[in-house]
Image (tube, rainbow, N blue to C red):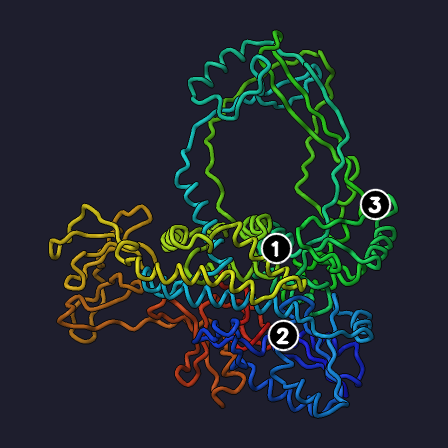
Amino acid sequence: MNLIIVESPTKAKTIKQFLGKKFSVESSFGHVRDLPAKELAIDIENDFTPKYVIMPKAKKNITTLKEKVKKTNEIVLATDEDREGEAIAWHLVQALSLDKLKVKSQKLKIKRIVFHEITKSAVEEALKNPREINLNLVDAQQARRILDRLVGYKLSPLLWKKVARGLSAGRVQSIVVRLLVEKEREIQNFKIEEYWELSGNFKTPRNDEFTAKLQKINGKTIDKIEIKSQKEAEKLLEILSKENYYIADIVKKEVNRNPLPPFTTSTLQQEANRKIGFSAKQTMTVAQKLYEMGFITYMRTDSLNLSEKFINESANYIKNNLGNNYLETKHFKTKSKGAQEAHEAIRPTEANRIPEQLKNDPNKSHFKLYQLIWQRAIASQMSPAKLDATSIDINTKDDKYSFKTTGQIIKFDGFLKIYPSHTKEEILPAINEKENVKCIKIDPLQKFTQPPARYSDASIVKILEEKGIGRPSTYAPTISTVIDRGYAERTENKKLKPTDIAFVVNDLLIKHFQDIVDFDFTANMEEDLDKIAEGKQKWQTTLKKFYDPFNKNLLIKEKELSKKDIIETKTNLTCEKCGSAMIIKIGRFGKFLACSNFPKCKNTKKIDHEGNEVKKAEPIILDEKCPKCGANLIMREGRYGAFKGCSTYPKCNYIQKQEQKDLNLECPKCKTGLPAGRQGKIILKRSRRGMFYGCNEYPKCDFAFWGKPTKEKCPHCGFIVIETKTGKKCSNKDCNA
């Protein structure tokens, strides 16, 4: 029996389906070794040697794998083909002591295979062509991990001391925070301006009506905000209403719209965010599942290449289902710097595997994302769409004023048949040059300039890619980290808005640790990591070049920086309790007013983003009696929300216990036998950190989660799927799904 080890149970299950009994396919359940959580674990003086440990959640599985290793003569490491996958393979060798076993047993064979898609042919081909573990890729992953650990463990404690507990810094994370803060400042400094547009309604000699906008005055195109007031608009309206008009120019041309290339990791995250509202993390989670199920090729790639096999399959599908006129085979060239051309773009494993095959999948997100990937890949091999575009100029008789209108008709839909866009047909009436037209009315439209839009997942990924910061595999987890660390929150329309603390930390880093938030410095660091992966640079050299000046500056700033100077701002307000001055402080959760005489006086007040005090709601007297003393109960606003308490407090300290909301959900942990013989229910609870969900059998069952429960079940472990700020995930902490 030969043993194949992959990262995930789903991937193992898929491979088992088309490999015979000769192979046993097992999962490592992700990473098996990492740097320990509560120590630096890097010997800086000894060439940055890392001290890896087997992760607590992996110990049981490693023991199981060791037993299986004893019963086989051939071990095949089939982890993913990127740096992370290569590192997992290397760590498996170390954790399972495979090198030592090989020395003891000459019969034992250790092979490394990679494949871009989980299909029978791809896996069988990989088994025929094994290779050694690529230590350059391992070194590149290791360098990134150590860099992030050095920044996190060295700089984060400084932020805890000088700003607030619970904060963190990171090479790419802090760049994202900088981008969000700078954008928010643009929005805050934006001055809204009023402007007016004039829209005319015209009638042709055949009584067809159409609208056009004022575009030119005296042959010069008017600026968007040129008409600044209602007075100016009305003055023009008076003139234009009296004028006679004719068709000055008609331009007709055929426009070709070419299909977009297949997806890379970056463009998939962007398009999934725009079209189906997925966060970057949700996109990658679902894509990972689709890959492991054998539906798509590997989803971490910056290449636009498509295999000849898929191109031929697509051609046959298009010819058989749409016709030859829809087919136009294309090869796309990757423009991304440092892209690995040997890899492929993200595509379906088979062109004939239409999205409808996933229509009944209980996880609806699988269908939505696969449909997007399939449509984009097939459309990339289709003919351009052909549009008839028309523009008409309507002038006053003296040609002093000119209106313009445009329209388009889809002459041939081409790739739009498969990959629809927001192309809107606008048909203009039949009209000839020099013909007179009648102006029925002119409408003045008041408008206002709009501030820049906040970043979405799509736009932040796009700018990171443009600046060469991070890599496809890092975009989604970085955005999630920024939100989880309290540096940003999602608005109602899913845009990323920085918190108060983000401004403080960003300004501190820019002033005192410029390299950490410098775009070019971070991009150059990514290039160094690429050189390590290519075997052109030693990973220790890269780390030393970064660490020596970083650590030197850190030691200086630890002495120089004062917490008081960073987080406190003076005000003209006076504390009503002790008469001392009130100051604005920055805490973990944002700005608040506090007495400068702290800790003698602990008076604090909530303030909004503009620094204005948020008045506490007045207690509401209820028509309910206190069961303890008989006085009326009142509704108060507390630190953790509204609650009912006795009106005679502090004489009587009765507080009504929170009503627990039954969600009609069985606890999945109890269901699996913990604790035996009991079946708990999931209820909504309140804590110092806010509202959360947990088992009503606590403390006998400690199952709890912070996200909002959905009706979906994890296909891997059966636990509840929850919605978090960063997307959907399994509520089971031990599940890698």
| Residue placed under numbered mark 3 in the picture | 326
Q: Which residue is mark 1?
A: 269
Q: Earlier in the sequence, mark 1 or mark 3?
A: 1
The residues bearing labels 2 and 1 have C-alpha atoms spaced at a distance of 24 Å
* Circle 3: element type: helix
Q: Amino acid at mark 1?
A: Gln
CB-based contact (under 8 Å), mark 2 and mark 3:
no
Label 1 element class: helix
Query: In the rendered image, which residue does mark 2 sit on?
Result: 88
Q: Is residue 283 left or right of residue 723?
A: right
Q: Separation of disc 2 and disc 3 at Cα? A: 44 Å
| Residue drawn at (41%, 43%) of the image | 185
Give residue 477's mark: none
| Residue 618, x across and y down, in percent | 22, 56
Q: Position of residue 685 (x, y in %)?
A: 38, 71
Residue at image point 70% right, 74% down = 133
Give the SS element for disc 2.
helix
Indicate the quadrant containing the N terminus: top left, top right, bottom left or bottom right: bottom right
Image quarter for residue 38? Answer: bottom left
